[in-house]
Amino acid sequence: MIRDEDVRTGKFLFAKGYLDKAKYDKFHRLLGESDDNSCSQTLVDVLGVSEEIVASAISEEFKIPLVNLTPSLLTTNNKPLQDEFLEKYRALPLIRSGVELTVAFIDPPYKETLESMRRDVKAFVIPVAVRRSAMDAVVHRETTVMENEYVSLPSKFPLEVLDTRKKGKEKYLELQKTGRLPNADVMVDEIVIRAIKEGATDIYFEPVEHELRIRLNIDGVLKNSVYLPKELIEPLCNVMRSRGSLNMFDKKKAQDGRYAATYGTFTFDMRVSTLPTVDGERFTIRILRKASRSLDINDLGFSPENLVLVRHLLQRPRGLLMVAGPSSSGKTTTVYGCINELRDSQKNIITVEQPVEFRLDFASQVQVESDTKVDYAGAVRSVLRQHPDLIFLGEIRDADAGAAAAEAALTGTMVISTVLASDALTCIPRMTNFGISPVWLASVLNGIIYQQLVRKICPHCRESYKPTRHMLTAAGLAQLEDSIILYRGRGCDVCGGDGYLGRTAIHEILIIDEELKDLIFNQASPVKVKEAAVKKGFESIRFDGAKKLVSGTISLEEYLRVLG
């Protein structure tokens, strides 16, 4: 829904030359299509207007102060009120003085919003305009206080004294000789606690020729943690085997397991996997922070345009929706967000997963165990006898699972599943390679959501700069204007000096219409399918990446790292 204040903002930017006629019309269309498309988000993320210009325009048009928001201005200690205003109004209460409440806005100060705020707080509301990134930085700082509760987790042992790259093996031999070497359980706990504190999602125990290398996956980038003596490989592996309920004696076969662990007041679900290598067993622990996962589809990084497409796909009552991407690209989180969007007391929702990563109170969840005879295909056929309206199939990884998903969709059930693929279009031949008949696939496939994760610029140290024409050309972005302003992280204490904090997703969404169904049925080449899709408005993931680049969400270096 477009409101009068949105119209005034658009006209101001159009009059000042920041929007041309095409972008001005697109602004009106997007805001009119969905209540979820906000004014500032559409201007910055979709139309490429800098957030400084948007904030300045709102300030000038509505005659309200333009404020450089910093954490020191946030003096209201009412956290519930801050959360309520952020969720309800996309605004942040800053200062309460007597009967006046100063509130920061990133969108225009809508008349009905101001009136609603006055009723909520029983005070006169004074609106001020701020940059979106400044508000994000302040809000993130407040939530970081909660996230940094992990920092209070006590250390169990100083692993540095065993680091062979720093101390050699002398200290290890000394501790072993004097009986002061901690047991393997303590060492594993210390490694995991350090990973949790640093925000890692995975821990890699990698035996190399003369030592055990521990690396952490932080925001999709590997970081060396510590190098331990090779003598510790066996005892550490035995601890992880025991915790993950793995076969203690079969060390020549890859295995998977899981266990729950509690550190301080925090409970984590750990997934363990082994892989035999020539230097010994390689172990991986994936850390699942269940409480931190968002199920709101609005928080998954979809641009306003892509969110409209996703909701269009979710409105279809039957058929197959695929979420594709490389390994560890957030596919399951996106599926959970889609399922949450469809939650309804009148819907029968059943999931089939290996393992169940997040408990859903509105769905029945089936866990497929690797050591039983029940596989994905058998589980799906059993689920169909429960008359579901929606089935989530964890991952299509073989012909049986693919056939079961197609069969379920053919019965009139909506099926959502994930698959490893390099882009949305190659997902189609991947499915047929799994043995799904092109006839079946053409009949049931509704669409494909492809995504990759990218690191976000740290809002605490973000700075702007003007890229050279050579930099833009090297990134395949020569079409951008010479006057374009991009952003990067300078590095600070909050982000650990690397300029990045957190991740978001970039997407491409392929809607399968009748023409594309016909091409799939006739097994047309991916080139022909892409040509037909582009004619109908399909945009590759590079477009979404470029939007997030221009809006200051990601850096040019991150764009190149992920998309090449």
Image (cartoon, helix red, strand yellow):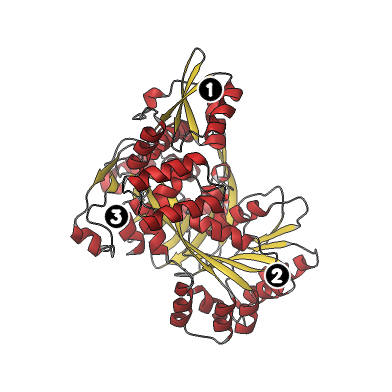
Closer to the camera in the image, 280 or 297: 297
Please rate how many residues cluster around mark 3, counting C-alpha atoms within 10 Å: few if below 14, some from 14 to 19, many from 20. Answer: many
> Which residue occupies the extreme top position in the image?
98
Q: Residue at x 40, y 36 (%)?
A: 58
Q: Looking at the picture, which amino acid does disc 3 mark?
A: Leu
Q: Which residue was labeled with disc 3?
A: 556
Q: Earlier in the sequence, mark 3 or mark 2?
A: 2
Q: Earlier in the sequence, mark 1 or mark 2?
A: 1
- When the figure is inspected, residue 32 is found, relative to residue 352, above or below; the finding is above
Q: Residue at x 54, y 51 (%)?
A: 32
The secondary element bearing badge 1 is classed as loop
Q: Which mark is residue 370?
A: none
Please rate how many residues cluster around mark 1, counting C-alpha atoms within 10 Å: few if below 14, some from 14 to 19, many from 20. Answer: few
Q: Place residue 139 in its image quadrant.
A: top left
Q: Which residue was labeled with disc 1?
A: 78
Please rate how many residues cluster around mark 2, counting C-alpha atoms within 10 Å: few if below 14, some from 14 to 19, many from 20. Answer: few
Q: Looking at the picture, which amino acid does disc 2 mark?
A: Lys
- Left or right: 443 with respect to 170? right
Disc 3 from disc 1: Cα separation: 38 Å
